[in-house]
């Protein structure tokens, strides 16, 4: 099949600083087309806009709706080889039907019935789980069973074998996040199956990875060097909650540390180097006190926010939504984001910020208070 490029319109390129449309110019452009060439002077407005023009759009998904559909899938769709996971991905309305939350981030609700196993596999994409509600599932990463409970943030770095098993008498759903779109775009994806069921079906309260690495400010001397992804298998809610609570308490005592008035936030980090938990994904937890509001912020790169608890209002650009537990909102690159709450709000956030920081393409703008809305 012969590749083609769209013909250049002479009418479109006429104007100040542009060549005069002539038969000779027309012939030149047909030559460009035949050789699969495109002149920069006809495309510069699209290739180099004055600010990012993301194809993704801001959107909200209601957790109650997602959960209802996932429950129905649990009745109709088996989990096992072929489908691998009973996971339903968020498809951003601006991305032409692709199952991507943003151009670099994949997000889905995964659902596992009592007694079910999600088969073991591994892939080059980095993954995490965040639990909004429920417990009873253990994810087994490289043979290490890790309990999943409400508020926990759990990691499955790329190319680690992992499967899940539900030992409870009730189903469980959670949020999956991966860098699938990025891997597909740059052509780096690999996938390999493992056993159909997890070998270790034990249910320890703490994984081996936690026992080795999840001690605040401490790392094992026997494991020197920097690791590309965090070796902590699970960041437990009790520690996240305490960190947010202490930030706000210290602010009350006159010590700095919060992001803004009534707004505390923490970032999940890699204890081997102090960086992000994974090379392509940043994860944070935010807490807004009753009546608090964030500064209006825009940044290069995209993010997905999920309400862990409470309720509030999220504004992205010209869109504004009321949100409650489990609801998800996508924020495209360079779109202004502001959040406010009445009775308090806890929010989980993951983004592609590490990519842009490594490329030195990151940029952040925070509006002054008089510009800050909603």
Image (tube, rainbow, N blue to C red):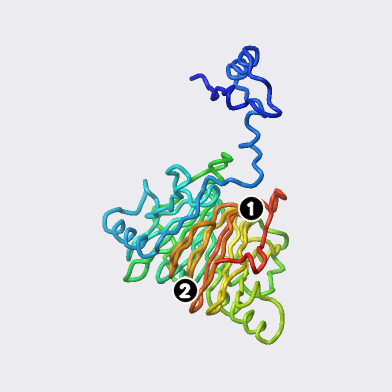
Q: 10 Å neighbourhood of mark 2: few (<14), some, or many (≥20)?
A: many
Mark 1 and 2 residues: CB-CB less than 8 Å, in contact? no
Q: Nearer the viewer, mark 1 or mark 2?
A: 1
Distance from label 1 to label 2 (Cα)? 27 Å
Q: Is residue 179 left or right of residue 229?
A: left
Q: Where does residue 193 sit, x and y in percent of width and height?
A: 45, 47
Name the residue at 62% across, 62% down.
297
Farthest-out residue, bottom: 253
**Quadrant occupied by the C terminus:** bottom right
Q: Which image quadrant is residue 261 in?
A: bottom right
Q: Which residue is mark 1?
A: 300
In the rendered structure, which disc, 1 or 2, sits on the residue that comes first in sequence?
1
Name the residue at 53% across, 45% down.
55
Residue at disc 2, secondary structure: strand
Farthest-out residue, front: 16
Name the residue at 43% across, 50% down.
91
Say which of 81 and 266 sits in front. 266
Farthest-out residue, left: 76
Q: Is residue 21 above or below residue 117?
A: above
Q: Where does residue 138 sit, x and y in percent of width and height?
A: 44, 66
The circle drawn on residue 125 is none
Residue at disc 1, secondary structure: loop
Q: Is residue 126 above or below residue 307?
A: above
Q: 10 Å neighbourhood of mark 1: few (<14), some, or many (≥20)?
A: many
Q: Is residue 44 left or right of residue 193?
A: right
Q: Which image quadrant is residue 27 in?
A: top right
Name the residue at 63% across, 31% down.
43
Say which of 129 and 315 sits in front. 315
What number of labels is visible?
2
Q: Which residue is mark 2?
A: 309
Q: Where does residue 150 sit, x and y in percent of width and height?
A: 46, 72
Say which of 106 and 224 sits in front. 106
């Amino acid at each position: 099949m012969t590749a083609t490029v769209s013909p250049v319109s002479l009418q479109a390129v006429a104007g100040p600083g542009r060549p005069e449309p002539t038969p000779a110019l027309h012939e030149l452009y047909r030559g460009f087309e035949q050789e699969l060439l495109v002149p920069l002077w006809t495309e510069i407005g699209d290739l180099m806009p004055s600010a990012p023009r993301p194809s993704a759009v801001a959107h909200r998904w209601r957790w109650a709706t997602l959960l209802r559909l996932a429950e129905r899938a649990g009745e109709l769709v088996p989990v096992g080889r072929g489908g691998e996971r009973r996971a339903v991905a968020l498809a951003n309305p601006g991305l032409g039907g692709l199952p991507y939350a943003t151009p670099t981030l994949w997000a889905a609700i995964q659902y596992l019935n009592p007694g079910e196993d999600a088969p073991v596999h591994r892939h080059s994409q980095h993954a995490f789980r965040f639990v909004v509600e429920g417990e009873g599932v253990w994810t087994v990463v490289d043979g290490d069973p890790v309990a999943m409970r409400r508020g926990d943030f759990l990691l499955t770095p790329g190319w680690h074998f992992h499967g899940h098993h539900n030992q409870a008498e009730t189903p469980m759903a959670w949020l999956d996040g991966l860098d699938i779109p990025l891997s597909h775009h740059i052509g780096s994806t690999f996938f390999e199956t493992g056993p159909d069921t997890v070998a270790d079906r034990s249910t320890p309260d703490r994984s081996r990875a936690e026992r080795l690495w999840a001690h605040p400010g401490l790392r094992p001397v026997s494991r020197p060097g920097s690791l590309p992804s965090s070796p902590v298998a699970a960041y437990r809610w009790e520690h996240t909650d305490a960190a947010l609570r202490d930030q706000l308490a210290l602010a009350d005592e006159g010590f700095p540390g919060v992001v803004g008035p009534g707004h505390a936030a923490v970032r999940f980090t890699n204890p081997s180097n102090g960086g992000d938990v994974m090379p392509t994904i940043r994860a944070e937890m935010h807490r807004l006190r009753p009546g608090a509001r964030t500064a209006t912020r825009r940044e290069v790169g995209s993010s997905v926010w999920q309400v862990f608890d409470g309720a509030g209002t999220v504004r992205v650009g010209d869109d504004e939504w009321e949100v409650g537990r489990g609801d998800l909102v996508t924020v495209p690159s360079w779109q202004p984001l502001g959040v406010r709450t009445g009775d308090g709000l806890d929010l989980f956030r993951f983004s592609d910020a590490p990519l842009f920081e490594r490329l030195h393409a990151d940029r952040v703008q925070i509006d002054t208070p008089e510009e800050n809305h909603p």
